[in-house]
Image (cartoon, helix red, strand yellow):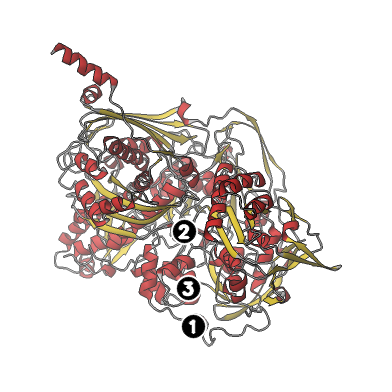
Amino acid sequence: MRRHVGRNVTRPDGAAKTAGSARYVDDLVWPGMLYGRTIRSSIPCGDITGIRFAFDRTGFTIVGADDIPGPNVVSLITDDQPCLASLAVQHVAEPVVLIAHADPERLLAASVEIDYRPAEPWFDAATSTHVFKHVRIDKGSLDEGFARADLVVEGEYRTGHQEHLYIEPNGMIAVPEQGGITIYGSLQCPYYVHKALCRLLALPPDKVRVVQAETGGGFGGKEDYPSIIAGHAALLALKSGRPVKLVYDRMEDLLATTKRHPSVVRHRTGVRRDGTLVAMDIDVLMDGGAYCTLSPVVLSRGCIHATGPYRCDHVRIDGRVVRTNTPPNGAFRGFGAPQTLFAADVHMERIAEALGLDPVRLREQNALRPGDVTATGQTLGPDTAALDVLRATIERSEFHRKRRAFRGTTRGIGMSLFFHGSGFTGSGEAYLASKASLELTDRGVRVLAASTDIGQGQRTVHAQIVADTMGLPLAAVEIEAADTAFVPDSGPTVASRTTMVVGELLRRCAEAMRSRLGSRSPRSFRRAHGPLVITMQYEPPPGLVWDDDTYRGSAYGSFGWGCEVVEVEFDPVTFEVRPTRVTTAQEVGKAIFPLGVRGQIEGGTAQGLGFALLEEVVMRGGAMANAQLTNYIVPTTLDTPPMDVVILERPYAYGPYGAKGVGEMPFDGVAPAVVNAIRSLGLDLRQVPATPERVMAAQPIVAAGSPDPAHSMRNDRRKKRA
Amino acid sequence: MKKQPAKKAATTITFVLNGKRVALRAHPMRRLLDVLREDCHLTGTKEGCGEGECGACTVLVDGQAVNACLVPVTHVEGARVSTIEALNGRHPLQRAFVEHGGTQCGICTPGMVMAAVALGPRPTRTQARIGLAGNLCRCTGYEGIYRAIKAAGKPVAKRSLEPGRQPGADRGGQRGRNKT
Amino acid sequence: MVPLAGCTDIYVGLNAGAPVHTRYLDLWRLDELRGIHRAHDVLRIGALTTYTDIIASRLVGRHLPMLVAAAHEIGAVQVQNRGTIGGNIANGSPAGDTLPVLAAADAIVELQSRDGVRKVRVTDFFTGYRTSVMRGDELITAVEIPAVDGMQFFRKVGTRAAQSISKVVVAGVRAAQPRVSFGSVAPTVVRVPLTERALANGASMSEAQRILQTEIAPIDDIRSTAAYRRRVAAGLLAQFWSSTS
């Protein structure tokens, strides 16, 4: 019975948040608590030759690399990143020493000097030879494809760093307890932190407990980074024997924590006169910063999405993510796809310009349809909705009428078509082997999952799914805190998987539990049989086959689909581009909490507008030079336009009630739509952020593309033979 | 964590906090934000940047929205200070924020709600955009916030934050107002 | 000894690691430094007048509307409620948004010390980047603006639509002798006398824009580039001229 799924229920955490009583890390205090501070490198590359403590150390706890009980490593994918630098540093703001004191004033006044023997840093990703990961995707034969092309269009597209700018900076509290440690943190993935700390501190799993505090935004910025700051807080807590609060101020958070990977993506595309894509040759370069972190997976997702939501028989995607001596980059909403989807859809616009084709017609012609095969060889299912979102958005936005009306004025309109695979790539979900549980209570059930609500409404959606599956009122479903002492490892809260994957686990738990209960109420069942906990583990959908070595197969269980139209106003005096309206249709399988889905689309769009127009990380000497909110600019109310959002549903057979993911996709389509709107003004822009300075420097558009000389020669030879 | 002035130079500051008169000892240059969170244990007001850019620390001082991270506590001597806790979770805006998607992660919400209170009754969307331009939200794209403000209709007038006071009440000789 | 008014800047500096002063002079309670009055064609604005006060003032709205325009563009509501015009002058940032208004209006800064009162034209007040003729024992007490004849113009080009530091900011008065002042294009706010004279003498706009480039010295910085500032300043000059004709 669907009493809650698909309806706008009252989100259970809303009252505390609006009352100001929800507790974030910095709101928590412990008796005897110390404050922690991280001493960081001031150079981008070099050996550490000495550390001097030029202050009275009374009452101070000091931790260096030598104090680490386990391996000095931040556990993620590759063991290349130290928790604390010991012999050398590879980037500015790399953590070297930790200090703690009960008096924040004395803590801040303490002067720690680090001596270095500087080495030559490497900042240029294009020439970096240290490759964290190389990905290659092949489909068909490029030669065959280009032989059929009437025109070849080439282009290079660039995106820069982006900062998550969660309004709550990173923070942790570590509390030593009976030979172990408890962490309260602003985080997305309690079990990532748990795993990293067990290793770092050489503690068994039952001696490490990680609890998510109310978290003020994540966007991926609290996916991998928390393992570092939690490790730091824990080391200080264990050495001092006291609780330690380690909370970053905004400047430190901006300087030291992860950012979106900058990218350079090159396209060389063969097209026929009628717009059919016949060959796509794509080169992807991403800058990973100084350590590997999650770069291989970011590159992977970026490459898999690199063609855009278009079909083409002959594709080659070659991607690499490399090291530079800058603070390591990490997860950020979209996770590689925004970078490559930006390139793909601005490139499509340039193809339309070159062929003199209507940009919508070009997208329509090439959009993936059910039954089509992607670049990795995945046959798409009936829930493929590219054409649906395209038509819905183009019609609702009055795209063609406005495009004609805006010609020759200072108003522009642009579109993008995009898609986003839900869940971990390929065998990733099978590898995670996530679990979730339901525990019977007297009133109803308790959800036990490691998923974290970071604003997106996880608590609400999980409760709705369980309530409806069990036929319970919403209030009878309790959501346990994301506390590793009580919940199983449901995997991280990332990759748009929390509804689709973990929600489905909970739905299966609820189904099984309802079966067990039969006609008994929870209370009477408990009286009769005692406690009941049902756990379900991830099962891949049937037929989901993926080869990590060849990058072939079904990359994701399902894709969400989106189309975006952005209208802009251009000021020829200041070169400012102001978005005036956004219209978007996005297909999400099933909107379990429609208000939540709308919120993700609206919020992701605003963040995308920042990425497209405003947000620039200015790097000088390998460090963020504009590490203050005064100078790192995110959109205010006056920078965001009205947003007209349409939610479409093409149910996914293996998602709970048909749901796919939605957290990331809304971000993907904004930058290309904005740049395409600027292109509609006649300005040749291929980069974001499209700041006024860049817009001022943009050349007028000259229609791209040239007949491939090799193709012409081949045709001449054939004609001669004939 | 901010550089804090020396503790030893504390002075007594007396002001009205959420309708109640309080007197506390603090260095006059301590930020109002820290005094509220640490001394008064009112952690509803949040710190997002310490630069007056994000508005998460918005409180009302004599009915005006200010960034508590930029106000030295000595400046509220004799003033009326209202934080999110003054609303007791019962203000129509608070309910509306929940029901209409005005709050997601919630960290900007207390400051946003206080700034929305300062907008006065039934602001237009344009007035809301201007009045909230100093409050950053990274989750909602602001649309849910406009919906919430519209749905809240006529918010309870500011006077009810402190029972018994009328709007435009004389504030004694502390601060003159310009007469033009 | 650091005098404090609205404090919208001091904590930003402290948080960024500027030295913690041990002595502050808190002016906030000095009501004598508040008030907006007009007498004998002179608009007198007390140093502690906030931007919100300016926006609300009918006197300023009638006699110096370009100052109201500037006040609207500073920060957002929270900053406008506390930031003061005296603070904007004393801070002396080349990007201070009220400064081009005051310079174009030939405003006078009133300074007081134990030795008495001193009045200095805004255009003589700043001597270099964040430096002025103000002595360590002086306080800004008011700013006086003589009657402004002619249409007033103000435009700020910031990094975004609100809460931004200006990349270029301009104020102008259209009269037989036009007055134009720019901020963020030199170490201090500047008037552009040669450009003004050219316009007064009927030069073409492109000629005036060419002369303008000799009177400004913008730099590349964290927010923008010299090239952008030059181009936009030229465009703003034209916009001033065409919108006040």
- Residue bearing mark 3: B119
Residue A318, numbered label: none
Tell me if residue A50 comes above or below residue B1 in the rendering.
above
Tell me if I can see residue C217 in this picture: yes
Indicate the quadrant containing the N terminus of chain A: top left, top right, bottom left or bottom right.
bottom left
Q: Which amino acid is tagged 3? A: Leu
Q: Residue at x 64, y 73 (%)?
A: B76
Contact (Cβ within 8 Å) of mark 3 with mark 1: no
Q: Is residue C139 above or below residue A718?
A: below
- Same chain shared by disc 2 and disc 1: no
Circle nearer the viewer, 3 or 1: 3
Residue at disc 1, secondary structure: helix
Q: Is residue A685 left or right of residue A560?
A: right
Q: Residue at x 63, y 82 (%)?
A: B171
Quarter of the image containing the C terminus of chain A? top left
Mark sitting earlier along the chain (3/1): 3
What residue would you read off at disc 2?
A636
Chain label for disc 2? A
Q: Give the SS element for disc 3.
A: loop
Q: Which mark is residue B160?
A: 1
| Amino acid marked by disc 1 | Ser
Picture quadrant of residue A460: bottom left
**Residue A490 at x, y percent in the picture:** 32, 50
Image mark 3: chain: B
* Horizontal and vertical percent position of residue C59: 62, 75
